[in-house]
Amino acid sequence: MPERQTTNQPARQSKLSEDWISVIVGLLIVLIVVLLNVTSIPWPLFGVLR
Amino acid sequence: MTETRPSRVGFWIGLAVIAVAAILIAELDAGISGWFKAQGIGKNPLEYPLIAVALGLLVNGVLRASRTHETLKPAMKTELFLKIGLVLMGARLDITQILSQGAGGLIQAIVMVTCVFFFTWWIGTKLKVNEQLKAVMASAVSICGVSAAIAAAGAVVAKKKEITYVTALVIFTAIPLMVAMPWIAQALGLPADIAGAWFGGNIDTTAAVVGAGTIHGEAAQAVATVVKMSQNALIGIAAFLLAFYFVVRVEKKPDERPSASMIWHRFPKFVLGFVFVSVLASFGLFSKEIVGALKTLSKWAFAMAFFSIGLELSIRELGRMGWRPLVVYGAATVFNTVLALGVAWVVFGLLGF
């Protein structure tokens, strides 16, 4: 039986690390926002179409 | 080795394209919302995920026509963007609020998730949809759309095209439901709490749930959000159970003994980040403004993810998956819609939660 191919895991390690990367990046962003007391993020950035 | 440099260049160029696209999506979202407001329609029915996928599809066509699609592919990290957005979204999940205000929401979420998951699984089995796609679909329809699909995909090791397929279905079905359900609720004369519970229990994307609640009114929006939050809280449990089931049943080899490490290996780790951030939020560690900032940051990550979905969509590949998954998804959505109304009516109407 051919092995199941998942396009997001040409190598199993890359999928695993991507999972952990998202946790690390996400927590880092939370840390930066809390430490710098960022209270607002713009959406949209310029508001040219408003 | 010779491919490293071009793929790195492709990655950075691709990332720049995706970042610029996210800025454009936010501008378009604000512009379209403003236009609808000017027409007297309070809520933009074209949510930003739809704008992002549509723009992604457009750029996808241009890249394929100019044969540059493969060059920029290393930057199309749909899952990574989604998972970062989901970790940040944990700040919106206040567990104490669910426990104190949302007993009804929690009951509804547990009933709905269990019934809809097994219904989708059953109909998927009848129509011979493969186990992985069935698991991703059942999680998406029953729990909370894209985030549950991503968590389930990690647990069952689904193919990337299966995730893209389900994600596209989630986005495209959420929009008509968001617009139609408040209108139907009003036509049926549903009280605000039952209507809100119906929206929260049925619509798959959080943005569209909030949208439907907003269209109906503030009271409905509050209940819809609690029900949706309760369903979001079940992602981790569902991911664990799916990883467990696939290790001990579906993919168990005759000479292999299932172990805890095999389940851990499959468990989507981003769920830990999501739960950790929501625990911090539940302990009141973030001010309301910081939660707002994190919510907007997650929106930026999702805009990049949904644009990447559009970039990666291959109509030919999706067409090869056939009509069966589409029928399963359609039937599950109809079942979800009808059942959510019944459960909302019992929990919030008859039982009076």
Image (tube, coloured by chain):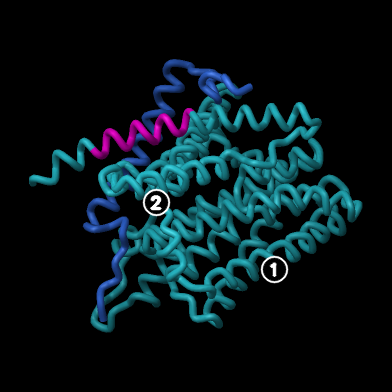
Q: Position of residue B239 (x, y in %)?
A: 46, 59
Q: Which chain is blue?
A: A
Residue ranking furthest to the left? B1
Position of residue B225 in the picture relative to residue B341 (left or right): left
The residue carrying mark 2 is B312
Seen in the picture, residue B287 relative to B339 is either above or below; the reply is above
Q: Which chain is cyan?
A: B
- Please give the name of the residue rendered at 49% of the width and 41% of the height, measured from the top-left corner: B55
> Which stretch is magenta?
B10-23
Give the dominant element type of the magenta stretch: helix, strand or loop. Answer: helix
Q: Position of residue B124 (x, y in %)?
A: 54, 76
* Real-space Cα separation, disc 2 to disc 1, in angstroms: 30 Å
The residue carrying mark 1 is B335
The type of residue carrying mark 1 is: Phe
Q: Residues within 10 Å of mark 2 (few under 14, many from 20)?
A: many
The type of residue carrying mark 2 is: Glu
